[in-house]
Image (tube, grey):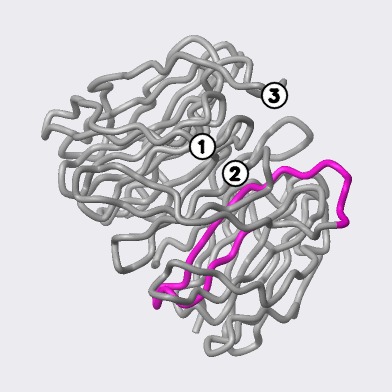
Amino acid sequence: MKEEILFGGYTRNGGKGIYRGELDTETESIAQPEVYIEVPQATYLALSKQHILYTVCKNESGEEGGVAAYDLNGSAPKLLNAVMAVGAPPAYVAVDEKRQLVYGANYHKGEVLVYRIAADGSLSLASTETHVGSGPRPEQDSAHVHFTDLTPDKRLVVCDLGTDEVVTYDVSDEGNLTKVATYRTEPGYGPRHLVFNPNGKIAYLLGELSSNVQILNYQQDGSFSLITTYSLIPENYTEHNGSAAIRMSSDGQFLYASNRGHNSIVVFAVTANGRDLQLIQRISTEGDFPRDFNLDPTEKYVVCSNQNTGNTTLYRRNSERGTLTKIQQDIVTPESVCVIFPQA
């Protein structure tokens, strides 16, 4: 079986934006990815069920950033439109199929953005919410919204690295936001990304600045509360690290996170109905600065991209034990920072 992979990335040092590769599950290898869509600063991607790709982007001058919509249903990607604004683009995008909305997280502006999806898949800005605040670390000089995605009960959950907050919003069908809860981490934690256990009652919050993962209770009123915290790096590791991506197997049995600096993927077994973790592996990403990785649709493989070294590594995943085994490295993916499987 052959599985399509899209890699989104920066375009600062020779990268072209979005690359397309193919994982052959019979040979257990990825063919050399090729340029798919030339988009400046295509650092995060999301694909709708209608096969419309939404990507972070900048304009050619670099003065404006936003989100572009590409129709992938034809023989070649077709640009539908791009919604742009002066300044830096978002750092994250997600699709809300039920309400036909797209959410964006603008790190530099501290903004939550909501876009409306038109019948043809194109976008228009529906609403924005600006966060205010700061934290104790140099990276927390202001609000830095880093994640905007749906909860199991279809609220919007937002991670703000700058203010050490996780904010939950109700969302109207028109895309208007109403804040319903705010969870505050310890100062300097730096919330970056969050994933939910399939049971819908437990979430795992990755702290970029603290290199930790918190296990959180998620309540019916949209609030979170802390259960416990685990480190993502070894106790004796003292060099700089910034944790980046967090993923969970669909059976809820294993949790994965990447470390930039330690340059590893850490693997936890999930126990006690999602309320506890057991460290089972740390494995090298065979490159520098692994900002993103993902499980393939079969969950028998993991693909991890290293931003600074421009290479991707392929792992075989043991579905019963959760452990990873490297089977291919040095797949060229210039400045790649996002990995998605369109058929997932």
Rendered-image quadrant of the C terminus: bottom left
User: Going 62% across and 58% down the picture, which residue do you hit?
Assistant: 230
Q: Would residue 271 be found to the left or right of residue 176 on screen?
A: right
**Farthest residue toward the left?**
173
Q: Which residue does the numbered mark 3 point to in the structure image?
A: 137
**Answer yes or no: do the residues labelled 2 and 1 have beta carbons within 8 Å?**
yes
Q: Which residue does the numbered mark 1 point to in the structure image?
A: 185
Residues packed near mark 2 inside 10 Å, few (<14), some (14 to 19) or many (20 plus) = many
Q: Would residue 311 be found to the left or right of residue 11 on screen?
A: right
- What residue range appears in magenta? 236-257
User: Could you say which quadrant of the image residue 278 lies in?
Assistant: bottom right
Of mark 2 and mark 1, the one earlier in the sequence is 1
**Answer yes or no: do the residues labelled 1 and 3 have beta carbons within 8 Å?**
no
User: How far apart, in angstroms, are the residues tagged by discs 2 and 1?
Assistant: 9 Å
Residue 232, image x and y in percent? 69, 57
Q: Secondary structure at mark 2?
A: strand
Of the residues tagged 2 and 1, which is closer to the observer?
1
Q: Identify the amino acid type marked 2.
A: Gly
Q: Nearer the viewer, residue 106 or 100?
A: 106
Q: Is residue 77 above or below residue 204?
A: above
User: Going 75% across and 48% down the picture, which residue do you hit?
Assistant: 260
Q: Which residue does the numbered mark 2 point to in the structure image?
A: 207
Residues packed near mark 1 inside 10 Å, few (<14), some (14 to 19) or many (20 plus) = some
Q: Secondary structure at mark 1?
A: loop
